[in-house]
Each structure stands twice: as C-alpha cells, then as structure tokens.
Image (cartoon, grey):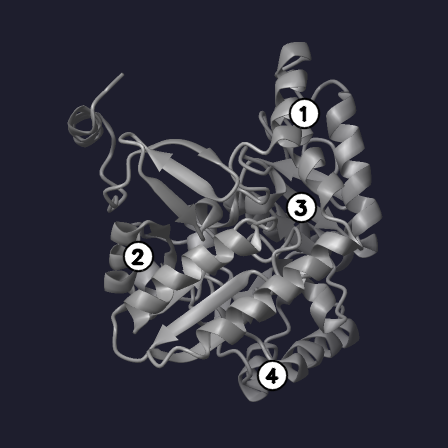
Amino acid sequence: MLTKDEIREWDNAYIAGTYARSPLYAESGKGAICTDKEGKEYIDFSSGIGVNSLGFCDSGWVEAVCSQAKKLQHISNLYYTEPQAELAKMLCDRSFAKKIFFANSGAEANEGMIKAARKYSFDKYGAGRHKIITLVNSFHGRTVTTLSATGQQAFHKFFDPFTEGFEFVEAGDEKALEAALSSDDVCGIMLEFIQGEGGVIELSEDYIRYVEDVCHKRDILLLADEVQTGIGRTGSFLCCENYGVVPDIASLAKGLGGGLPIGAVLLGEKCMNTLTAGTHGSTFGGNPVSCAGAMAVLSRIDEDMLSDIRKKGEYIRAELLKVKGVAAVTGKGLMIGILPKKTDSKIAASECLERGLIVLTAKEKIRLLPPLNISYDEINRGLEILKEVLS
C-alpha cells in the first residue's frame, strides 16, 4: 500500500501533468460517500463529473459488472454479444433512437454524431454540405475535432490546425443563426440544452423550438449533445424531453456506464441507416462489461426515480436560494450551478473539500452533479458545508 506522499510523488513522476489535482487521495466509496487513505469521509456532490449515476459501488451495479467480467470481458465487434444487443434495445425503447452506435467516451460519441450528420448530408445532397453550427460557450470534447466544435476560444490554442467545417453563433441570437445558414452548406446544428462546462446555462425554450423549426424546414439535422445532461441527470431520461424536442441524433456517455467508460450515438429515423459497414467503428465500443454496467444503470432509472431526481433538485435549489452568499442557482434536476455573490468558485470548491464535500466548478459557478440516488441525509450534510462556505 502506498502512502499519500508516495502516491503524489509517483503521480508527479510518471503521469502526464494534464490535471491540477486537489489533495484528495481516494481509497474507497459507497453511495455518495468517498473515503480517503486516512479514513476521512467526503460527501460527493460530483459523481466523478456526472459518471457515477448510482454513486460508488452500488451493489446491483457491482454484481452486474462482476458477473459479466467472469463470463466474457471482450471480443471484437466482428461478432455478436448479448450485452451489446440488449443495451441497444433498452436505449431505443427509452428514447427516440432507432439504432445505436457504441463508443467509449463523450468525445467519441460526439465524433460519431458529427460523422453521421455529414454522411447523411453527403448521401442525400452530395459533397460540400458539411458545415455544423455550434454555440458560443459550448463544450463538446477534447479530441481535435470536438475541440474544433467547442465554442470557446480558450480551447482553440496549441493544437493547430483544427478541423474545419464548424461555425459558432451566440445562443438565443436568431439573426446570427440565420446569417450562418445563408451559405447553404450546413448539415447540422449541434447544441447542449444545458451548457455544463460553460457554466450550467440553460438554453431558452423559445430558442430551442426556433432551432428545431429551422432544422425541420431545411432538412438540417438537430444534434443533441446529451453527454452530461442525459441518463436522468436533469429529471427526464434525456434533457431534450424537458423541452418537448426530438433531435435527429444525440450523444450519451458519462452517466450511462455508472463508472465504466462507454459512449453511445443515438440515431433517429432519418439517420438510422447512415452509418454502414466500414464507415465507422470502434475496437472497445460496446464492451460487454461496460454494457452490463450500463444496463444496471438503465434498469434503475424509472419514472419513480426521475420524479425523485426532480424533487431533490428542487429541494437543493430552494435551500441554496436561502443563503445570503448565493446570487443565483441554475440548472435542472441534479445538474445545478451556483453563482456565489463574492467567493471565487475555485476557492469555494477548495474550502468545501477541506470540510469534507466534493463539488465541481464551471467557470464562475460551483457545479453540483450528485449521484442520482443520493439520500436526503447526504444532501443535507453536504448542504450544511456548502452553506458554511458560501456564507
């Protein structure tokens, strides 16, 4: 067993320094409680950035994953497996999707969505109709292409040349969108219904419906990045359901696997046959063990749980709005952004960690993504720490 000092030294010596790590040395976890190397407990309001849908080491999830790992951990996508077929059916049954493509992450799911949109347009209209419009302040991943699709200049450094074929417009600006569509080379409009990394900012219902109408009239695909907002996070299975909108394609990842890497491209009726043999693929996509974990998650997210998520989210927001140090609270369900009146969000997150609470940041906001099945006792313990810090 390594000591904390050894872990830090080996990490610094042997792991690329791409993360500004906080001083938490995670050892184990159960539910919404993480325990460090010295036995200190932390209430987790982050879910590993929205990944641990059922918290740490949920017994049903563990059993499903371990059972599958004992039978078949991997075989290539040249062959059939039951977990992949079963998970695909579950996702289609729960959503607008007619077909599924499995990947390993949100960035890969967004790459698959981009490729499907461009191929749909190529198949129907020929070359040249390939541009995808995304929103300023969006975040779609860290591959070169998904960075290119991300509407934040801070990410457009160091890695030139970036993939061409993306244009950014301000969310809510209908005139800017019309101008971007004037060139007649657009195949898709890609957006997050709630911009997560951008600051937990909800798009307005009027704007979403305007975008949907534009897409339908011009045969432009509506591409929904549901990597962070999907799998019950906002109180509906997909966030787009809160708006009554049906996209043509959507991407999933994060909370789908409950802790294991998996991504999915949900292909609606227009695009269900767009990706054909040889046009896309993934060695690890649809891995049997990851699929087993995802099925354990989906089997738990029923209407009762979704109602519970909405109620817990409303409770947390109401409690936070009572705090004098809180200027605003945004988000839906258990995807919550807190704008402090005076405290810097990063300083507040550090102070929360010292007191035993794990939170995230999103620009100037504190971001909360607790496990979907977190208890009210755990919520209240976490809120007590948040209130101390924000006050």
For mark 4, give the secondary structure. Answer: helix
For mark 1, give the secondary structure. Answer: helix
What residue lies at 43% left-to-right and 62% top-to-bottom? 383
For mark 2, give the secondary structure. Answer: helix
Q: Closer to the observer: label 4 or label 2?
A: 2
* Disc 3 crowd, CA 10 A, few/some/many (<14, 14-19, 20+): many
Q: Amino acid at mark 4?
A: Glu
Q: How far apart are the two marked residues, 2 and 1, measured between alpha carbons?
A: 34 Å
Sequence order check, earlier mark of 4 and 2: 4
Q: How far apart are the two marked residues, 3 and 4, measured between alpha carbons?
A: 27 Å
Q: Left or right: where does residue 213 sit relative to residue 109?
A: right
- Residue 351, x across and y down, in percent: 25, 58
Q: Amino acid at mark 1?
A: Ala
Residue corresponding to mark 4: 178
What residue lies at 51% left-to-right and 49% top-to-bottom? 50
Q: Amino acid at mark 3?
A: Val
Q: Residue 265, which numbered label?
A: 3
Sequence order check, earlier mark of 3 and 4: 4
Residue corresponding to mark 1: 64
Query: As displayed, is residue 223 above or below residue 181?
Result: above
Query: As displayed, is residue 210 above or below residue 251?
Result: below
Q: Residue furthest bottom?
A: 175
Residue corresponding to mark 2: 352
Please indicate, yes or no, whether residue 223 appears anywhere in the rendered image. no
Sequence order check, earlier mark of 4 and 1: 1
Q: How far apart are the two marked residues, 4 and 2, measured between alpha carbons?
A: 44 Å
Q: Mark 4 and 1 residues: CB-CB less than 8 Å, in contact?
A: no
- Please state, as top left, top right, bottom left or bottom right, where the N terminus lies in the image: top left
